Image (cartoon, rainbow, N blue to C red):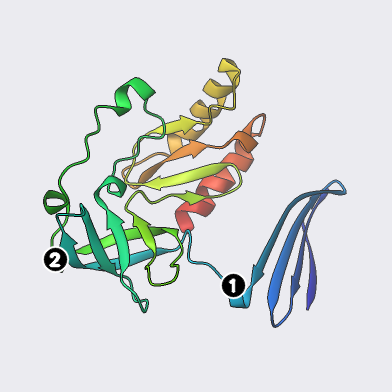
Amino acid sequence: MNIKAQRKKGTELLINVTPTEARVALVEHGVLQEVHIERRMKRGLVGNIYKGKISRVLPGMQAAFVDIGLDKAAFLHASDIVPHTECVADVEKGNFVVRDIAELVRQSQDIMVQVVKDPLGTKGARLTTDITLPSRYLVFMPGSSHVGVSQRIELEEERQRLKNITLPYVDDDGGFIIRTAAENIGEDELAQDAAFLRRV
């Protein structure tokens, strides 16, 4: 099944779905911008978010096993139970000490996690509690309360402009990281991205 959808002037979203795979292409002014292919048999778990339950705490390994509804329990290391530090200066990151796993989680505790590595062989998926939801221009960080800007956006005026636009979208539910693709993007596009991520 082929679908050609006009999103706005000069922008097309092309979708091709077959029984074995789905392909999506974003074309702006005749130039291919993004392509995403998802094969049914090789659909990964990376990026998926689950409400899991701690099944075992292993103080010797500084880790815990988490039941997220898969065949194998997933793995959560103490170092992956961290606050959002993406926008913290490198000199300050040293102040974030990894605490003992027994202080961070307990058996039978419910926990929100995101998969960072697919299961492989006998090993379950690798998890983090540092949940992020990416879109084209922004990354939403539930539980965070700040706005960060990609370090690849070098011009200080542009960094401040983007931060000023995005700051009103930060609340108790979460904050944002402004991605490199947002450089020179208008207020409307950022507002749409923020609204989309909050719906997700």
Q: Which residue is under mark 1? A: 42
- Residue at 34% x, 41% y is 144
Question: In the structure shown, which secondary structural element does the residue marked by tag 2 occupy?
Answer: loop
Q: Residue furthest bottom?
A: 19
Which circle marks residue 3 in the picture?
none
Question: In the structure shown, which secondary structural element does the residue marked by tag 1 occupy?
Answer: helix
Would you say 85 lies left or right of 140 here? left
Q: Which residue is under mark 2? A: 107
Q: Residues within 10 Å of mark 2 (few under 14, many from 20)?
A: some
Q: Is residue 196 above or below residue 151?
A: below
Can residue 78 be seen here? The reply is: yes
Can residue 9 be seen here? The reply is: no
Pointers 2 and 1 in contact (C-beta within 8 Å): no
Q: Earlier in the sequence, mark 2 or mark 1?
A: 1
Please state the horizontal and vertical placement of residue 81, each as a whole percent of the image.
Answer: 27, 48
Q: Residues within 10 Å of mark 1 (few under 14, many from 20)?
A: few
Residue 149 vs residue 43, the one in the foreground: 43
Residue 85 vs residue 141, the one in the foreground: 85
User: Label 2 vs label 1: CA separation?
Assistant: 32 Å
Question: Mark 1 belongs to which amino acid?
Answer: Lys
Would you say 133 lies left or right of 56 here? right
Query: Which image quadrant: the N terminus?
Result: bottom right
- Residue at 53% x, 27% y is 151
- Residue at 59% x, 42% y is 137
Please state the horizontal and vertical placement of residue 18, each as a whole percent of the image.
Answer: 73, 79
Question: Mark 2 belongs to which amino acid?
Answer: Gln
- Residue at 27% x, 66% y is 66
Quadrant of res 69: bottom left
